[in-house]
Image: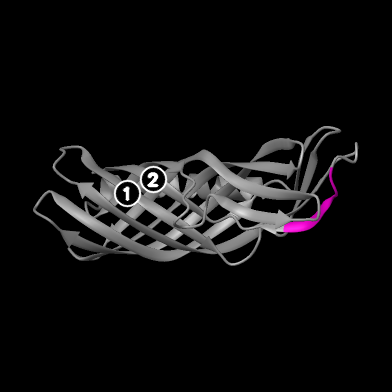
Amino acid sequence: MRIWVMGIFCFFGGMGLFAQNQNKKTYGGLVIKTLVPNSIFRTSTIESIDSARASLSVRNKPSVGFGMNIRKNFDKNWAFEGGIFYIKRTLAFQVTTDANRFNNQYNIVSYEVPLHGLKYIPFNDNIYSSAGLGIGCNFFATEEYENGDSLMYTFSRRTSWFQPSVSMSYGVEFRGFETGMLYIGASYQLFFSTFYNSKTESSNMLFSTFRNYGTRPNYFSVDVKWFFE
């Protein structure tokens, strides 16, 4: 699967170079994403379980992603945008008992291919806003994750190597530069199902085992893009 994902990187990279040379209405660009936990979109605490003597919470921590975009303008109002992103997100697990708190965490790597329809809203000749809606094709590279010790140990297994999502974006574009344009905005990924099923336990029997709970990979991000002319 990793060879296939790298093939997509090469495809979009080649398309970006072709687009810059052949068609001024098609743009290739670079993207930096900052994944921000957000209570409004429910991307902060993504799982919470209570038992008789303990409670478990799973939280997204601030994370990063980067990649490349291709955008094709159809006219002054509509465009299509695709790309591929490397996403590295951090999940934090916490078990709280009457006497103690136990914590561990690990990073989950995925590759995202968003496919958006875009609507432009002009403010003036050089500043536009754009609203996007489409689908995200998400590929999870690693089947299993684990971390912890005798106090608290978490094991997670991937439910599927591929997960679709609804992908939404909104941002503002600054087009007054000679070499390209700057985009600053936000995006939200809404998934249909869980991406990893997990088990959290203590070999020292400090709390009862939390078994087979799932977490959804929804995320909210702040995005910065630079599109080359």
Q: Position of residue 135 (x, y in %)?
A: 47, 65
Left/right of residue 142 with respect to residue 207 in the rendered view: left
The residue type indicated by label 2 comes to Val
Q: Which residues are magenta?
A: 207-213
Q: What coloring was used for the rendering? A: one colour
Tag 2 residue: 222
The one nearer the camera, 144 or 55, is 55
Residue 78: mark: none
Distance CA(mark 2)–CA(mark 1):
6 Å
Instruction: Judge the density around disc 1: few (<14), some (14-19), many (≥20) Cα neighbours within 10 Å.
Output: some
Residue drawn at (53%, 43%), measured in percent from left and top? 86
Mark 2 vs 1: CB contact within 8 A = yes
Tag 1 residue: 185
Residue at the far front in the pictured view: 98
Whether the magenta-drawn stretch holds residue 82 is answered as: no
The one nearer the camera, 6 or 54, is 54
